[in-house]
Amino acid sequence: MAQAYAYTVYRGTFIQTPRLPHLSPPPKTELVRNRGALWVSSTDGRIKGCDWQARDEVSFKALLARNGWVDIDAPEANGSDGNEVKVKIVIANEERNEFFFPGFIDTHIHAPQFPNVGLFGSSTLLDWLETYTFPVESGFGVQADQSKGTGKLPKDAPPSALRIYDHVVARTLSNGTTCASYFATIHVPATNALAALCHLRGQRAFIGRVCMDNPDFCPSYYKDISADDSLSATRSTIEYIHTLDPKGALIKPIVTPRFAPTCTRPALEGLGKLAAEYNPPLHIQTHISENTNEIALVKELFPEASSYAAVYDKYNLLTKRTILAHAVHLTPDERSLIRQRDAKISHCPASNAALGSGIAPVRVFLDEGITVGLGTDVSGGYSPSILEAARQACLASRLLGHTTSFCHTESKQTLQNGNSDKPTLGREKLTVEESLYLATRGGAAVVDMADDIGGFDEGMIWDAQLIELGGVKDLGDNDNPLDGQVNGVQGLVKTGPVGNVDLFGSETWQEKIHKWVWSGDDRNVKAVWVGGRLVHSRS
Amino acid sequence: MAQAYAYTVYRGTFIQTPRLPHLSPPPKTELVRNRGALWVSSTDGRIKGCDWQARDEVSFKALLARNGWVDIDAPEANGSDGNEVKVKIVIANEERNEFFFPGFIDTHIHAPQFPNVGLFGSSTLLDWLETYTFPVESGFGVQADQSKGTGKLPKDAPPSALRIYDHVVARTLSNGTTCASYFATIHVPATNALAALCHLRGQRAFIGRVCMDNPDFCPSYYKDISADDSLSATRSTIEYIHTLDPKGALIKPIVTPRFAPTCTRPALEGLGKLAAEYNPPLHIQTHISENTNEIALVKELFPEASSYAAVYDKYNLLTKRTILAHAVHLTPDERSLIRQRDAKISHCPASNAALGSGIAPVRVFLDEGITVGLGTDVSGGYSPSILEAARQACLASRLLGHTTSFCHTESKQTLQNGNSDKPTLGREKLTVEESLYLATRGGAAVVDMADDIGGFDEGMIWDAQLIELGGVKDLGDNDNPLDGQVNGVQGLVKTGPVGNVDLFGSETWQEKIHKWVWSGDDRNVKAVWVGGRLVHSRS
């Protein structure tokens, strides 16, 4: 769709994390704040330039004049002679503590499990799959009435799947997720529908049809008929997605063996080959080393492999475009293998706590040079919000020093410096800044798009969110705040804050970001753009 | 204030947890759901009766007629002859999945630390106190301009303190907290102001002036001048509160030695005696065994004591009305002592994760017959919501099996049955139902009000919240949900849900409660009552 303007000029405060240099250990992550203007082309949705001097009205007007830009929403724009370049201006309001932030990247989410959000009882991975997950996923295979439906969506997709998937995309967008790597189900029509919905709503997505053909593990009511069926069905969704979005500008297929226990050797082998058939090779996603019982099961099912990671490696599923979810209990040899292959890790702290899986040693990954991003892992995770995942990443890392795996393995040495005999040194803790790095730049690297998304570098795609923290409570005057308000009760809460972020006026800008991370939610997400397109605005 | 009606009749669904019998180990907690009507006296705010048959319109009308009740909001009430008893009717809307739930009880919260919510970096207890906490608390001692102010609030309280405290009370009420045990600061005027604000807004509260006179630990800019000063200042707030609320119907003082390291022996001794002076003895609150460095410090400061708990016991501070916050690393001997004294524990899981303190073994406490409730511990905890505390209690308990303290202490044996050699058996996990028990009945027992609040038993005080989960998304019809909606993007999110609780129609009522616990927030709190008085309604 051609826009009526050549650029969108974003004005105000821009906050991001820097791109980490390839150093081990990586340097301390600090947030970067710029104020001024940044412009995005309507043609390709990429950042074409910025001017951090253009902070006040005079210098902003000078910027416009210098470029021959006219604001399409300003009255004088109507009277232009047609030679000027039309631009749209979007402002982050300083007084409301608004700022632009890179869109969140959810590197691991199961779209069909959304109806199960919050339902997991006290289960752990393997019984959770059987009790909660396989039943809800199997429902995406019901027959659709193909006489209905629109041209934009696959006619053979069941309406219930469409509605749930539509809700998932809406919810994740409203939480600032501009890019998600989705596990769908084994069903081709519903999987294609998820791809079509993301395309329609404008969310960047990797869409994976789930492969699970091992009759010894998968329930009879929810499995691929055979390895060949796994492969041909996967190929079918790949073709659909390549037709839907030939350049892969927004939607890409991702080869998705659910995890080693669900797949036969022929399926794993075929999927590895399938991914490698394409140029560039397709992305791959799966689970690894989430739960100790699962690890024991993999050992039992694949006695020939030296480790869980080695199973994937044997079948060429451990590539630089592979996303490994969880990685809670990796051995040093597995980490070494993953680093050699440059495979990526999706850290899912909310899920790992909820299902009692354990705590992944993210600092060890980072120190060793492994790429890490965040995943919500809905519905092992109870929230579709990457901000919640960032919070939980911080919290989990603060409990890591109390865990046996941390104290009794080489992780301990990795994090120790000098000859202290204390097992917990604090380096294992992730800072708010590091969690935000994982949520943006880290996730971008996990989906192999570090040059395109996750930050505001020139040339990058404008996948971004406008965050509004709200006004500062005025504590400066000497008037009694309660006159005439106490009986109304809601008095002060109505003024100032958006959602639960309370600012009192003494915060540094970095502290405001901390308050956002610890108290923020979807109420603070005022607008979301993907590829320069507005895909969500708060209602 | 006299009401224009004798009773409020609440109609709809009522959900609560049962009161636990004194059994060890306690039985599995299930939620109790009743539907019908329950009525509360306008005179004393207590529940006078209920009728679980009065579900439909006919039987509800019969209930009214049987009692001679007329609805003050119904047209026919205006024409009554004056002999009928007037009642107000409040309905929980079934279609919107509304239900009444007992108000939450926050057994540990630091009101003056509210401006620091979300600000703690990677600190742990002792450096957190020095870096973040003491500086913000010390600000509550600024001189007030006594020529201003209203008659309802202490004139000598600084306006900044009033504003912050007012916001704390508003925020906690809006999150469904009907009763809170507050730590204030060392300052008498500001502490009294917190009491007055809770009284005005109608929140049930225990108000503690913080005692800290140990010059070897407390900073010179924020400490009591002497043990005598600690005692006389505490006495002063007690007297203020006893004047404010002579019967202690809503507000009670609570003796508050901050924690052992901040207090000299004379102060601890004097505070123990002070609490015992009254009939009944005053409540007491303090911290215990939150952090390993803190425990080492107590051992160093009190070498004569056999344990941290023994310090408090020596000075008669371990009573059946004592709230001990944290209790992360108690020894078996300490647990035994606490149980003997019937002192209570405030479990603060969000704080214990945020400050990296560790995970308290709540199941062990419950199994041993120790009374436990939940605390937000703002601002060691990053949220004023007890629902968030309940979530974090569930999550922390699911990670407990991975911790060294759990695997290497007697806790392991306590939770093991049979001769399994696996350290984690799952019993340590708290269910959603148990977390809600801790948030309501458990908290009520912690503040020694188990007969009065925390449930809907006849005779109990109506401290309650009306929760609205929102409508169920209609997945039943066959129409394509996206026609004409996709371009607007917000389409489906606008309809149905309140906040982030998504219902799809297949949930049991218990599952709806799970979804509330895992996805709910203040948006789902539609109204809050304390002592029968409406103290918050969602704006």
Image (tube, coloured by chain):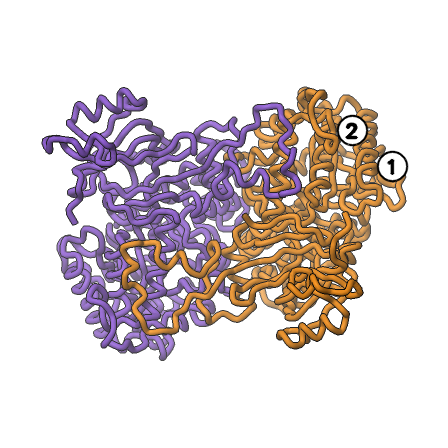
Chain colours: A orange, B purple
Secondary element under disc 1, as helix, strand or loop, is helix
> At x 22% / y 39%, what residue is drawn?
B460
**Residue B266 shows up from this direction:** no
| Camera-side residue of A259 and A376 | A376
In the displayed structure, A481 sits above or below A386; it is below
Quadrant of residue A417 in the image?
bottom right
Pinpoint residue B32: horizontal percent, then vertical percent: 35, 30
Q: What label does residue A273 carry, if any?
A: 1
The three-letter amino acid code for the residue at tag 2 is Thr
Decide if residue A517 is on the left or right side of residue B306.
Answer: right
Q: Few, some or many C-alpha atoms within 10 Å of disc 2 (few <14, some 14-19, many ≥20)?
A: many
Q: What label does residue A264 carry, if any?
A: 2
| Camera-side residue of B13 and A399 | B13
Residues indicated by labels 2 and 1 sit on the same polypeptide chain: yes
In the displayed structure, A129 sits above or below B207; it is above
In the displayed structure, A39 sits above or below A258; it is below
CB contact under 8 Å: marks 2 and 1:
no
Decide if residue A98 is on the left or right side of residue B294.
Answer: right
> At x 74% / y 45%, what residue is drawn?
A323
Mark 2 vs mark 1: give the one in front: 1
